[in-house]
Image (cartoon, helix red, strand yellow):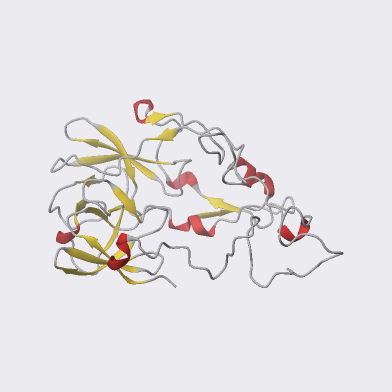
Amino acid sequence: MIKKYSPTTASRRHMTSIDYRDISGENNPVKSLTKKLKSHAGRNHQGRITMRHQGGGNKRVYRMVDFKQRELNIPARVEAIEYDPYRTAFIARIVYANGKRSYILAENSMKPGLTIMTAQKAPLKEGNRMVLQNIPVGYMVHNIELTPGKGGQMAKSAGSYAQILAHDNGYTTLKLPSGETRKVLWGGFASIGQVSNQDSALVTIGKAGRSRWLGVRPTVRGSAMNPVDHPYGGGEGKQKRGTRRPKTLWGKITGGRKTRNKKKYSSRLIIKRRK
């Protein structure tokens, strides 16, 4: 649910955020399921910036989310739905019948007290996790394994899901959130339903300071730079781009140039590319 603000300032006039009253978790996560990640702020192992516009932001504690969910045939009860600062989706704190606790991605309709299960063939209920081969055509799935046993890799952000279109000859055909249609080995696990917090994409940041809280540093337009700093730089007043094709700061062509490796092994599994 989207929360709006009274226009007490110019930046607040259009600012929106997620209403976190809907989530049930306490302020503090389970300590044994968290760890502190060192902030590299877009730097590589040599300490050089390889990704611009990153740095600062509020301190965060990483929740160790279980993307594999390998406690098979053991029912688990949802204890709480919690906020996770490292992802757009909410996470669910679950406790298995054997007493083990873990965090998983929360399904959109998940509520405290709900019982879920991971099995080769589990009941067809939202939140349950099973092998793709055993999920009927037409169902929505998320946290999908590309390689069986590796853990979920696709459809994990807020509100995302893939739709099962077919099962054939060891592969399940999925329509992904991007619009791409591709095959995935049907021995991989997937969770039924849509990822929680589907209103995440509707949030309006509202002011620059809020981006800084999130660890996003300012972006300067190339046309505002000098010629030595960017292919678009220089000129008197507001100049046109001055180059036929759009380019990055380093002169690499962007916008309309395919960047996917033509020899990538998984290309044969893609039936229809995204638009």
Side of 120 relative to 198 (left or right): left
Depth check, front residue: 24 or 189: 189
Which residue occupies the foreground of this view, 76 or 69?
Answer: 69
Tell me where residue 195 appears, x and y as whole percent. 36, 54
Residue sitting at the far right: 236
Q: What is the tally of numbered marks visible in this picture?
A: 0
Q: Position of residue 246 (x, y in %)?
A: 64, 67
121 or 42: nearer the viewer = 42
Q: Position of residue 117 (x, y in %)?
A: 19, 46
Q: Residue at x 30, y 40 (%)?
A: 66
Give the quadrant of residue 103: top left
Q: Image point 38% across, 53% down: which residue?
A: 196
Q: Is residue 69 above or below residue 270?
A: above
Q: From where the camera sits, is residue 268 visible?
A: yes
> Which is more toward the observer, 182 or 49?
49
- Position of residue 120 measured from the top left corner of the image (x, y, whole percent): 13, 51
The residue that appears at 71% across and 61% down in the rendered structure is 231
Q: 156 left or right of 213?
A: left
Q: What residue is rendered at 54% in x and 71% in y?
A: 256
| Position of 187 relative to 172 (above/below) | above
Q: Quadrant of residue 253?
A: bottom right
Q: Residue 26: tell me if it is visible.
A: no
Q: Quadrant of the C terminus?
A: bottom left
Quadrant position of residue 177: bottom left
